[in-house]
Each structure stands twice: as C-alpha cells, then as structure tokens.
Image: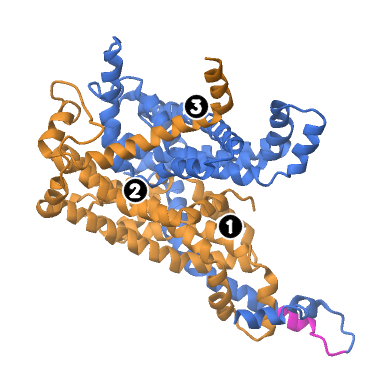
Chain colours: A blue, B orange
Amino acid sequence: MKVNVLSIHKNRSIEKRIHAPNSKGKGISSKKIHHYKMKKVRTAYLFLAPSFIGVAVFVLIPFLDAFRRSFYEAMSGKFVGLKNYSIVLHNEAFLLAAKNTGKFLGICIPLLLTISLLFTVMLGSIKKKGEFFKTTFLIPMAIPVASVVLLWKVFFHKSGLINVVITAFGGTAIDFMNTDKAFYVLVFSYIWKNTGYDMVLWLAGLSGISVSLYEAAKMDGAGAFARLRYITIPELLPTIYITAVLSMVNSFKVFREAYLIAGDYPHESIYMLQHIFSNWFVSLDIQKMCTGAVIMAGVILLFILLLQIIDRKW
Amino acid sequence: MNYFRNFIKKNIAALILLLFAFLIIIPLWMVISGSFIGKNEITRNLAPVLSDGKGKAFWPILPQYPTFRPYIELLLDSPAFFAMFWNSCKQVIPILIGQLLIGVPAAWAFARFEFPLKKIIFTVYITLMIMPFQVTMVSSYLVLDHLKLLDTNFAIILPAIFATFPVFIMMKFFSSIPADLFEAAEIDGANEWNIFIRIGIPLGNSGIMSALVLGFLEQWNAIEPPLTFLDDKSNWPLSLYLPNIATDNVGVSLAASVIMMLPALLIFLFGQSYLEDGIKASGLKE
C-alpha cells in the first residue's frame, strides 16, 4: 500500500485537479466540488462524533447545568441571582484555599520555569552524559505518587531523616508537615516531579533556534549572558507561554501528594482549592460546588487570556 | 587547592545537575533497597514516623539482612493488595482502550479535515484539557448520579475515556503526516476509512504510543476521581489504597510500593522516547 501510494505521489494532487480551469470542458463542475466538500465534512463529523458526543454528555452539558445551578438555590429551586457567588466569595475556607492556591501557583510556576530552563542550558553546556541526566530527571513522572508518599513522610516527619540530620548538627527539629513549612514541602515536591517534563519542552524550544544566530552574536563579541538575554529568551517566548500553561495544568496535580500525605484536613498552609472541593463534596454541597467550579473555570480562562496577551505583545 | 577551584568552576553545571539527580536517585534507591528489609527491622526503623512511636527514623544504605520475606508476605498473605491491584487494572486498561477507540478517530478528524465549527470545537477541547479535575467534578458527578453509575468502575472509566488530552497529542502527530500521501491515495480510489486505517494509523503510530504512555502514567496515579466517585473502599485502586497498607503493615508497605511502581517504571524505560515525543507534542503551538 505504502509503495503504491508513493509511486503516485508525482501525479497531480486531487486538490489541484478540482481547482484547475475547465480548459477541456471535462473538468469537475462546481456542483461536484460542492458535493466532494460536503462528503468530506460528513466524514469528518463521523470521525469526531463518538468523542464529541461523549464530551458533550459527560462534560459540556452538565457544566452548563452547573452554571445554571450556580444562580439557583439547591433546595427550593428558586432563582437567587448572584447570591451563591456572594456566599462562596465570603466563605472563609474558600478564601483561604484560593489564597493558598494562588500563592502556590505564583511561587511554583516561575520557580519551575527558571530552574528547568537553567538546567536545560546547563545540560547543553556539558555535552557528555546529557542523556543520563534527562532520563533521571524524567523518572519522577514514572514514580507513582503513592509509592513516594511514604518516603516523603520518612523525610519530613518530625522524627524523620531530615530532622535526624538537623539535630545531629545541633539544630532543633522542625515539624515540616504540621507547620507552615508544609507549603514548602509541597513546592519541593512539585519541582521534584516536573523539572524533567519542563526540560523536555525547553529542549524542543531551544532546538528550534538557529545556531547561526549564536555564531553571529559570538562574532560580534556577545558574552554568554548577552546571548541568553538577546537571543535565547526572545526566541523562546512562544515556548515560555506554552510551558507556563502546562506547568499550571500540572500544578493542580500536586493535590495528590498533599492529600496522600496529609489527608482531608492538612495544615492550613496547604489547604488548597482541591481540598475545599472535596470537602464540599463530602457534605454534598452541590450549590457551592457549582458556583466554585464556575469561578475557578473563569479565573483560569482569564489567566490564560492574560498570558496570551503578554505573549502577543512581546 | 587552586586545581580544585578550577575543577569546580569548569564543572559547576555538571555538579549542580548531579546534585539534583541525587535527589531523584536516592529516594528511588531507598524504596527499592528498603523493600528487602525484614519486617522487624523496618518496623523498628519507621515506627517513629508512621505510628508516632518514640525515637528517630533510620534508613540503612543497604539492608542489614536482605530478604525476600516482605514480597512473599505481600504476595501470599495480603488479599487486599491483590484486590486493589486488580481494581487498578480493571480501571486503567478499559480507560486506555476507550481513549484510543474514541480519541484516535477524533484526532484524525481534527488533523485531516476542514469542517464548520472546527476551530470552536478544538478550542473547547484545549480548554477542557487545561481545566483541573475540580472544575468538571460537579458536572461529572451530576451525570454519573443521573445514570446511577456512582460507586461502580464505570464512574472512573467513562469520564476518563472522553478526556481531551490524548486527542490533542495524537492530533499533533497526525498533522505532521504530509497531506500529499492522502491525496495520492484518494486518486488511487481509496476511501476515507481506508486512508485512516492504512495510512493514518501506521504513520501516526508514535503519536498513539505517546498518548498511551502519558495516559498510563496519569491513570495509574489516579487519586481524585476514585476518591470522589467511589464511596466503597473495596472498589478503590491501588494508587489510593497504598498509603493505607503503609499504616496497617509497615513490613510489606515498601514491597507494595515497588510493585505499584514496577509497571510505570517499565513503561517509562521502554517508552521513554514516546514519553518525550508526547511532552514535546503537548508543547508545540498550533
């Protein structure tokens, strides 16, 4: 089949045939073109239908329903306007969770982007053993959360290994998981897990920059820093945008570690939006969940729009 | 001394990378070597951490008396572990098969055809891909409740099958197949179905593999969906149940961790290039 296809490769493409002028009066009429296109559209919808119907049934339609519900009272079914939003936005637990999640995103994403980009540049500078490091940094993606959680406990517990070292050097033990240090354990966990992923994205972005740019800059006497500032970073901008978005997607998954280490009610410094949703769920507070989901979706969309605007302006 | 300073200066990048690599290799080594430590020894070492006992946690670089006992005990005397492992399989395998059956044609539709509303539908797919579980959690709950599927494996399987991330990844690979190939086949009289089966799938094969590898790593780690949609703990997958084993029976917990980790590590070792291609594809701009 493949050989057959390739041998015909030199023929005129069907697209060209269709658009060729009717020089001999035997070309394909516009009616036929229309028919051809309609058939294509129908085929496309057939291919897409199973997926789209599923997405519509399991996500889109119910989300619209959740959107509608966010304006009604769950019990009486009365239209209450923005009252649910006011309740959720004045809910102390929600505010704490939103603040923590925002802080987490604000610290983690820039930190991860910087560290992974630095590592990628370092990887390029060492030439040898690059493959070894890349593989090693990707391994955390393959280690199931449940398998490392026990180790995180062993390291970060009040009588854990880190404290053994700290006290051996005469320091006082830190209770990582039950103080606001828990937040930084989560930050570490996120960086630990996602550096490899982001490095692969950076590598793909860097490989798209032409080497001649660097050579020209070197000829003009630009130092390593100048090259980073004036070539690498501007050329990488599209990659920065997409890497930031994907890092955000992955940042929500840090709930897995938080939940498996600390359960439903962790220290308040790592009480995230995910916790409050799962607690609302336990009490089946559908009204708040619907409203919360709409708010969260709205904020994420705004954030992405903002990133897009920055991306275009630069 | 001067020589030493020069060495550091020259190799600072490699040293920093090495340091970070240790942060990954050491925990991995600890889980694996720890799984061969006998029950009494490990209980003694970890009691301070896991059951708030007195003393301090301790972890030998090598087990004092390496033994297979934890594995034997786990495989022979822990029916709960088997049940949960089997639950994981019953959820993950149908999800991956479903994602392919549904997602491959959808990805093909986006890559191969122009049709009205394509842009809007694709934007919806990308948006859904970005949203965290919590945004769509209520929606899924409402449907699953309506369909009376809560507390069954279908509650985990069905919503996951329609995840849009695999569609996005595979679409990127399908788009990179030169269109000339399809046109040539069309002239040859092949219909769309044949083009899809004979050209699309074989040439987009690495995209399908990438989606599978990423999908497996994601689903093998599922925490939120089972936590939300499965009340009955006997339906829980291993990913959610494992920490319970750790507190109940420290002796076998590390062996259980290793067995949980094994499929994921194997897929990683054999599919690393697919994993990397998949990540790259997720980063390519349309």
**Quadrant of the rendering where the N terminus of chain A is positioned:** bottom right
Q: Is residue A122 left or right of residue B163?
A: right
Q: Is residue A94 left or right of residue B128?
A: left
Magenta segment includes A200? no
Q: Residue at x 45, y 51 (%)?
A: A63
Chain bearing tag 1 is B
In the image, residue A159 sits, relative to residue A186, either above or below, namely above
In the image, residue A12 sits, relative to residue B91, either above or below, namely below
CA–CA distance in space, label 3 to label 2: 25 Å
Q: Position of residue B78 (x, y in %)?
A: 12, 51
Chain bearing tag 3 is A
Work out whether disc 1 and disc 3 sit on a shared chain: no
Is any atom of residue A280 visible in this view?
no
Chain bearing tag 2 is B
Can you identify the residue that label 1 sits on? B122
Q: Nearer the viewer, mark 1 or mark 3?
A: 3
**Residue A90 figure quarter:** top left
Can you identify the residue that label 3 sits on? A107
Q: Residues within 10 Å of mark 2 (few under 14, many from 20)?
A: many
Q: Are marks 1 and 2 in contact (CB under 8 Å)?
A: no
Can you identify the residue that label 2 sits on? B221
**Residue furthest top in the image:** A170
Which type of secondary structure does the marked residue at label 1 adopt? helix
Which label belongs to residue A50? Answer: none
Give B111 or B249, whichever is nearer the viewer: B249
Which span of residues is magenta-colored? Answer: A25-35
Q: Position of residue B173 (x, y in %)?
A: 58, 61
Amino acid type, mark 1 = Phe
Which type of secondary structure does the marked residue at label 2 adopt? loop
**Which of pointers 1 and 2 lies earlier in the amino acid sequence?**
1
